[in-house]
Image (tube, rainbow, N blue to C red):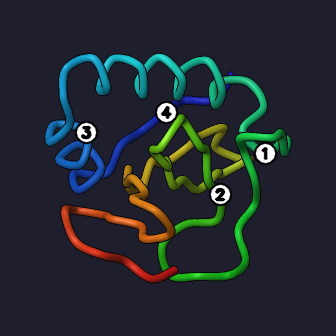
Amino acid sequence: MFEIKFIPEAIEDIRSLRKHERKRIIEEIEAQLKHQPTQETKNRKKLRPNQLAEWELRIGKFQVFYDVDEQKRAVKIEAVGYKEGNVLFLHGEEYKL
């Protein structure tokens, strides 16, 4: 089982959402990333190299960006964003991957 850790910015991202959105995202992170965070699925994929994170988990209109340390059995949540159309917003601002 993997330990899930959030960086401070990711915690702020989650806090900025509505209560029901926070609950759904946290439940999905627990369900999807505790056991096989590096197994690709229709909602979980490895990203091309970028400065944000190695992996993405999609939960509806939200994206959870994370890195995995297989040796430490840890998942580090780097950011939680959302899309409006084709535009990704992280930390309340437009972001380009």
Alpha carbon of mark 4 to alpha carbon of mark 2: how far? 14 Å
Disc 1 secondary structure class: loop
Q: Residue at x 64, y 31 (%)?
A: 33
Q: Amino acid at mark 4?
A: Ile
Q: Are marks 4 and 1 in contact (CB under 8 Å)?
A: no
Quadrant of the frame with the N terminus: top right
Say few, some or many: other residues with alpha carbon within 10 Å of mark 1 (under 14 / 14 to 19 / 20 or more). some
Q: Residue at x 52, y 28 (%)?
A: 29
Q: Residue at x 19, y 20 (%)?
A: 19
> Of the residues tagged 4 and 1, which is closer to the observer?
1
Identify the residue position indicated by label 2 in the image. 55
Alpha carbon of mark 4 to alpha carbon of mark 1: how far? 13 Å
Say few, some or many: other residues with alpha carbon within 10 Å of mark 4 (under 14 / 14 to 19 / 20 or more). some
Vertical order, 88 against 8 (above or below): below
Alpha carbon of mark 1 to alpha carbon of mark 3: how far? 22 Å
Disc 4 secondary structure class: strand
> Is residue 8 left or right of 94 when viewed as pictured?
left
- Mark 1 and mark 3 lie on one chain; the one further toward the N terminus is 3
- The numbered mark at residue 14 is 3
> Is residue 72 left or right of 62 when viewed as pictured?
right
- The numbered mark at residue 4 is 4
